[in-house]
Amino acid sequence: MGLYLYGSLASGDFDPASSDVDFAAATTVRLDDAKLVELAAIHEEIAATVGTWGKRLEGAYFPLAALRRHNPRDMRHPFLSSTTPFGVHDLGWDWVINRHTLLERGLVVDGPPPATLIDPTTRAELTHAVRMLLRTDWARYLDDPELLRARNYQAFAIFTMCRALYALECGEFVSKSVAAVWGEQHIDTQWRPLVERARAWRADKTLDDAALPETLRFLRYMIGRA
């Protein structure tokens, strides 16, 4: 039915050293087990033959009704990422934001315009999703920060907090780069060196436990604001 790109490719913030290829596929029916097996084999072949980009795909497959609007009772869909094998997974509140990005700036690989498949997201829905992400997904890192030890993941977390604050205050979701520039001008001055440092760390996979406490303190500050 349709294949679309969102994320940094759609926002103009794509960085070959650190970005994934984010996609969403619209299907006319809910995929059955046989189709899921076929898709899993296709993605295994892509990862084995395409090279780096074949291993850096991140996206989901939605039947049309599920793509149109967020339904908290229908959040299990086929998904894969560079760290999650292809399968049916519970998708989080970030897909409220992803739908918004698809509608506003999605790139069409094949299929009708996103506006024919996705309902607009209200400001209240967008900010609610951002708050839920901070209070659930990101709050977990405070108790289990293992994944944040690497500098590139700390940079990702810092930029995500800037985007969250921008969304909460401005009612819009922007690229990491735009949010970082805005954050350096609007967040409390104590955090501005952290944002500046994150710029240099986007592709740096060095483990940095010395910097981690400050990053976690910033996360705790932002989650508290949610």
Image (cartoon, helix red, strand yellow):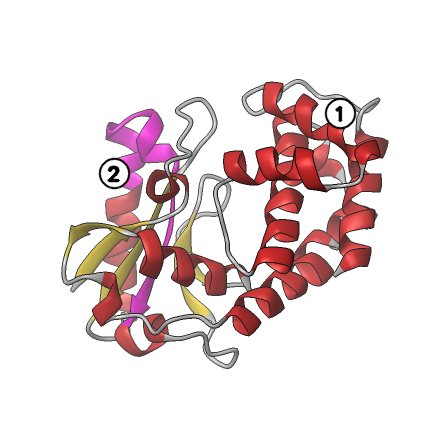
**Residue 93 drawn at (x, y percent):** 55, 64
| Residue ranking furthest to the bottom | 73
Q: Nearer the viewer, residue 41 or 69?
A: 69
Q: Which residues are magenta?
A: 44-63
The quadrant in which the N terminus is found is bottom left
Cα distance, mark 1 to mark 2?
A: 43 Å
**Looking at numbered disc 2 in the image, what kind of residue is underneath it?**
Glu
Q: Which mark is residue 193?
A: 1
- The answer to whether 209 is drawn above or below residue 82 in the figure is above
Q: Nearer the viewer, residue 64 or 40?
A: 64
The quadrant in which the C terminus is found is bottom right
Q: Which residue is pictured at 44% across the width and 70% down the height?
A: 121
Image check: 216 left or right of 21? right
> Badge 1, how many Cα within 10 Å: few under 14, some, many 20+?
few
Secondary structure of the residue carrying numbered label 1: helix
Residue 48 belongs to the span the image colors magenta: yes
Which residue is under mark 2? 45
Q: Which residue is pictured at 32% across the width and 67% down the height?
A: 62
